[in-house]
Image (cartoon, rainbow, N blue to C red):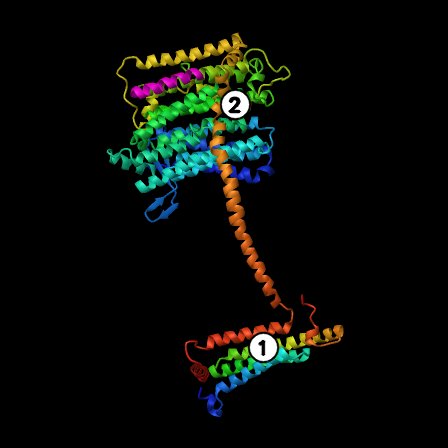
Amino acid sequence: MNVNLHLWLIPLLPFAGFLLNGILGSRLPKWLVTTIALLTPLVSFGVVLNAARFVFGIGGAASSLPYIETCPIPWINAGTLHIDFSFVLDQLSLVMLLVVTGVGFLIHIYSVGYMAHEEGYARYFAYLNLFLFFMTVLVLAGNALLMFVGWEGVGLASYLLIGFYFSKDSAAKAGKKAFIVNRIGDFGFLIGIFLLLANFGTLTFSEIASKLVASPAWQGGVLTTIALCLLLGATGKSAQLPLYIWLPDAMEGPTPVSALIHAATMVTAGVYMIARTHVLFDHAPFALGVVAVVGAATALFAATIGLVQNDIKRVLAYSTISQLGYMFLGCGVAAYSAAIFHLVTHAFFKALLFLAAGSVIHAIGGEQDLRKMGGLRKHLPVTFWTMTAAVFTIAGFPPLAAFFSKDAILYEAFLHGTFGMALWFVGLVTALLTSFYMFRLWYMTFMGESRSPQIHPHESPWSMLGPLVILALLSIGGGWIGIERFAAFLSPAVGPRAAESTIPNLELMLSAAAVAVALLGWYVADRLYRQKPGQAAELAEALPVGYKTLAHKYYVDEIYDATVVKPLFGFSKYVLGVVVDVVLLGGLAWLLGGIAMFSGAILQRWQSGNLRSYAAWLAAGAAALLLFVLVPWNSVWPASVDFIWKVARH
Amino acid sequence: MNNFLSQGVPISWFLLLSAALFSLGVLGFLIKRNLITVFMSIELMLNAVNLSFVTFAHEWHAVKGQIFVFFVMMVAAAEAAVGLAIIIAVFRARATLAVDRIDLMKL
């Protein structure tokens, strides 16, 4: 069936929005900026919906996926290497596209209300559209190099948006930190791409996959190396151990940016990349094990830090890292469909959490400290109820979305042998901690009495509340599709779901355990923050070492500072700065300058200003030239005279 | 070349004459102190070149060389007009035409 889906429109429309608003935005009226900024992602979303209609066969025959669209102009054509701009639509990229453009559009709407009174309104939307452009390129890319373009591009957009308030020192620093830490991951991704090229001779995902499927005995070895390199890239982008440190600082950006880029879409790119190259990871069991361990460790690690944070956005940032850890855990036990399922539900509820937090911050005039909130339930009813939906979702209560997706991951981890059971246990503890810190946030924000009576909160405009309500509905109902149907849909792209358990009712038992720990977390939070509000502080005093370690985020920033940043600075300052810059380069410059000055001092005597001396030199030069041309220097003098005569006589 | 040799003068003589005139011009330019003499030396060099132009034009039956001569004459005429005007101006200002004294551009 020959249907043209115009996939190229999906990225290029936001790019057009970026160009228009980026170049002309400051001169256009505000309503026009808003229209451009909202219309381009909306039309992109429409194109995606059209593609989805086509995939599901509504109003026509269902298509055979993957559907590939290739730019007729090749990108790189060098020897045996051919790389095209090719966009691939399969089940996996369709799901991602729906999330990216759908949630992205909602956050665009929200931003209209949130950013209404900010400086740089057009610049903000230009960056946001730029982000959507690169993100959709990343998702649609049919080969690793094009994906890398999107990968770098979202990093750029992230940097620009984290440092949006660039006059604030901390924001500028956070942007730089995010960019530099991501470079470390990108280095791994790039090495992985080179290794893929060296070993497969192609970067197209489908060709790599078919080559791997054709040789099932090819396991480990260089594949493990490639997979680990790709994993390094994924840990950078998706904020996993050991490169997670940029994400908490990235909260310096405007809150809708945190929702879109640092919660719902960009940070899940690592998970998407692993799912996209899952055939490679399936052939490298060791790397897969590393993915699972990294995921589980990050989930637990970030959740413990999240327990004691007092900045509402930082709690959510650590929660994002922790939830991304779940997704990595899912990928690591080869439950890619479960990981993508959690990715989707996470996009809903985490975007909702951030947007609701943004609504709270907006309502109380920019305050982000949980200790200064409280009692906001009465003032912000819509925000409160949508936030409640999100909190109950992330805590994992049935029948909300995350219950299904988180359980799917934990269940598949449990089936993964003894190693898997250990991972499952870590996941379960993380679920307990997640439930606790989310209810802590909920109580501190909305319940009790206001701790800052001088603030008069006001509910946000409907441009902000509308997306909240839609996302709340999605957070509640997003999981009802069920992992079985979701996995069956995705299976052509990411492989079938792992085998079912032989133990009867195991899934039910595991779900019951998950709900039990969620309830336990709620109970502890209720006790510490509602019934006896002073008890949390007493507990912190009783365990000074533990509390301080958590409050200082395990001193990871300090450790990195001492082991990586300081030595690098020292190396730059003393070795590169003094030896290379001053001695070598500076010395070379002085040497060259000295030669020029010295020879100039000699040659300037020549420039006597005496016209006749110039003329004499000119005549001498002409005579020398004439001599040089006419005299054959290898002959003796009389022969040359003879030669002149010959020339003349001729 | 035979047709030119009907008068028995070989082409090399013309060229040698041209070279001699040019060398005289250069020499005059270099050693004379009077500005007008220097100027005349320049004219001499130009005409030496004209002579070789004409020689080669006739030798190779190429009219281009002759056209060049007209160009050179025209430029020489214009140069003579401007040059003499400058010389008069210099004489009025400095009351001398000795080249060695006219050295205001010297560092």
Q: Which mark is residue A101?
A: none
> Is residue A201 or residue A343 the one in the foreground?
A201
- Horizontal placement of A535 versus B29: left or right? left
Q: Which residue is mark 2?
A: A313
> Is residue A497 or residue A29 the one in the foreground?
A497
Q: Can marks 2 and 1 be said to lie on one chain? A: no
Does residue A19 appear in this view?
yes
Q: Residue furthest bottom?
A: B7
Q: Is residue A422 magenta?
A: yes
User: How packed is label 1: few (under 14 Cα within 10 Å), some, or many (20 or more)?
Assistant: some
Q: Which residues are magenta?
A: A415-433
Q: Name the spot of residue A553 as percent of width and height, x first.
A: 49, 23
Does residue A143 appear in this view?
no
Amino acid type indicated by mark 1? Val
Tell me the SS state at disc 1. Answer: helix
Q: Quadrant of the C terminus of chain B?
A: bottom right
Marks 2 and 1 sit apart, C-alpha to C-alpha, by 86 Å
Q: Residue at x 26, y 16 (%)?
A: A502
Q: Name the spot of residue A121 as percent of width and height, x first.
A: 58, 32
Q: Chain of mark 1?
A: B
- Horizontal placement of B68 versus A510: left or right? right
> Is residue A177 or residue A595 the one in the foreground?
A595
Q: Is residue A424 magenta?
A: yes
User: How packed is label 2: few (under 14 Cα within 10 Å), some, or many (20 or more)?
Assistant: many
Q: Chain of mark 2?
A: A
Q: Name the spot of residue A196 as percent of width and height, x first.
A: 33, 39
Q: Which mark is residue B72?
A: 1
Q: Residue furthest top?
A: A531
Tell me the SS state at disc 2. Answer: helix
Q: Residue at x 35, y 45 (%)?
A: A82
Count of numbered tags: 2
Q: Residue B71, relative to residue A72: is it above or below?
A: below
